Amino acid sequence: MLTDWLQHWKHPFDAEALRQRIQIDPHWSAALRAYLSHPLVLPETPLSELRFLALDFETTGLTPADDQILSIGMVDLTLEAIDIAGHEELLINHGEFIKPETAQINGLTPHALAQGISLVEGMNRLLERAQGKILLAHHCPIEKRFITHFLRQHYQLKAFPGYFVDTLEIEKRFSYAGRNRHHDSYQLDDLRRYYHLPDYCAHSAASDALACGELFLVQAKKLGLQKTPIRQLLTG
């Protein structure tokens, strides 16, 4: 199993083979069972034919074993449009883990999170929306690590069989400025300014997911990626 897990991260387009090897437990959540029962897209599929789910997590830190997810932001998109009506932010009832420094950044307070849902409910909603889609994030290893940690803790799964595209990596690999190290910063806000996208006043998981989705659409158009097979953009 360890060899399978390492092979998955070395070759991310082998996630479908990993999905097929997982024996689904009938006691797992309906959302997880449905997700694992649905084949992933073919690696040769061009971006123009795919659906994406832009993600962003607000967390107490960057280490899943020690930190907690505070909110999950999601929005659906294709290369044609972003589904603003499906723009969603889920607050996770983790108020007891709030740190003063993170509250100052994201505005999430113990009182607000007390009205939230459980992490299991939040992840189930994510899995429901992720089915049949490519997951999109800016610096996606953060979201990937937290999802994988959740599945390991709750279902003893070693890896998450999903496809991720990272807008930060797209910029580094496909843009002239990225390949030649002309960018001073690869932060989401800075890359949006580079592409003349507007600033968002308030930062939240929902607004950052939307911001990532908008950046992706501009990158796909400016860098001519519409017909690029998804396998060329997948991150390991």
Image (tube, helix red, strand yellow):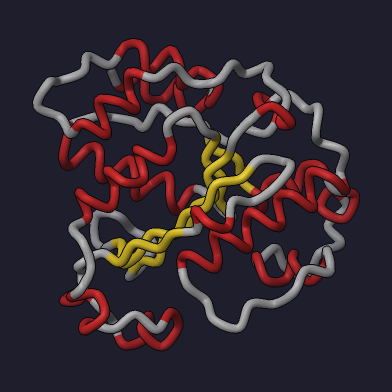
Q: Residue 9, position in %: x, y?
A: 47, 29
- In the depicted view, which residue is nearer to us: 150 or 24? 24
Identify the residue at image location x=72%, y=41%: 79
Quadrant of the image for the N terminus? Answer: top left
Measuring from the top left, give residue 36's x and y in whole percent: 33, 23
The residue sitting at 54% across, 81% down in the picture is 202
Name the outermost residue toward the left: 27
**Is 47 rendered above or below residue 217?**
above
Q: Is residue 133 above or below residue 149?
A: above
Quadrant assignment for the C terminus: top right
Of 184 and 118, the residue lying toward us? 118
Residue 52: name its quadrant.
top right
Given residues 146 and 65, the one toward you in this image is 146
Position of 60 compared to 228: left or right? left
Q: Where is residue 229 drawn, in percent x and y? A: 72, 23
The picture quadrant where one finds residue 170 is top right
Question: Left of 76 or right of it: where is 4?
Answer: left
Residue at 31% across / 46% down in the picture? 125
Q: State whether residue 150 is above or below residue 116.
A: above
Q: Most extreme residue toward the front, as rendered?
A: 85
**Residue found at x 70% / y 50%:** 216
Query: Could you tell whether 148 is left or right of 88 in the image?
Result: left
Compared across the picture, whether 26 is left or right of 91 comes to left
Q: 90 or 21: nearer the eye? A: 90
Q: How many marks?
A: 0
Residue 171, x across and y down, in percent? 76, 50
